[in-house]
Amino acid sequence: MHARIAAFEGDVSRIDELTGMIRERMSAGEEIPGAKRFLRLIDREGGRSLGITFFDSEEAIRTAEPIFEKMGDEVPEELRGRRTSVEIYEVAIDDIADGARAARMSSLEGSPGGIDEGIAFINEQIRPEASDLTGWRGILTLADRQTGKAKTITFWDGPESLRASEARGDELRAQAAEVMGDTIASVDRYEVALHEVPAAV
């Protein structure tokens, strides 16, 4: 499984309108061909959002790219924001339960050689401990084996649980970075606006 992450910046005052539009298209089977799942994260205060679309392979993402471009032309920038980047990652860990309402994304950068060790550490050490924290709703780990970049997104049942987990989250993130020999590039917090599977056509 692979994931395409499109990042947007700008006015998010109409982001709920956009989310509703995406949900309607998905329910009508009009979404991206080959897409297995769609996740939308919003930072309302920071004016940022992420659209994460899951596919079986990188080839499927490349095949769908013209459709993404067409959608970008059809949806005005004042509604979707300005696209700032598009990245493709391997989905290394995918365990998101229903009821996820908030997310914290830790971005790490380091050597490609540390990816597998880091994934093993997350599976063996972080997941069991984090799953005992109040409000835990799952984890998504994305890896780029060529560059050594990795993103781990933890999911929570709401902003209160997200805030309550910050201190332990800092400790676990530092441990993971040490194991992988990585540096922590950023830590961002989002609202989970959409997490859906497209309807079959």
Image (tube, rainbow, N blue to C red):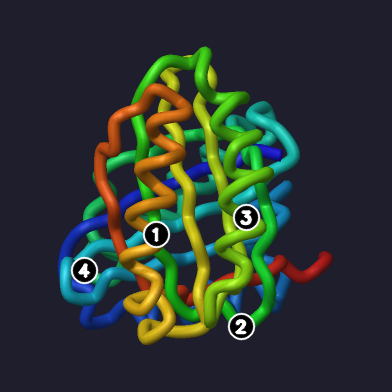
Q: Position of residue 183 (x, y in %)?
A: 29, 30
The image shows a total of numbered marks equal to 4
What's the CA distance linking mark 4 and mark 3? 39 Å
Q: Is residue 63 above or below residue 46?
A: above
Between 138 and 68, which is closer to the camera in this rendering?
A: 138
What's the CA distance linking mark 3 and mark 2? 18 Å
- State the SS at label 3: helix
Q: Which mark is residue 169?
A: 1
**Which mark is in front, 3 or 2?**
3
Within 10 Å of disc 4 (Cα), the crowding (few <14, some 14-19, many 20+) is few
Q: Which mark is residue 43?
A: none
- State the SS at label 1: helix
Residue that badge 2 annotates: 99
Between 12 and 126, which is closer to the camera in this rendering?
A: 126
- State the SS at label 4: helix
Q: Amino acid at mark 2?
A: Gly
| Circles 4 and 1: CB atoms closer than 8 Å | no
Q: Which mark is residue 127?
A: 3
What's the CA distance linking mark 3 and mark 1? 11 Å
Residue at 53%, 81% in the rendered image: 134
Q: Which mark is residue 78?
A: 4
Q: Amino acid at mark 4?
A: Glu
**Which mark is in front, 4 or 3?**
3
Residue at 43%, 50% in the rendered image: 172
Q: Which badge, 1 or 2, comes first in the chain's sequence?
A: 2
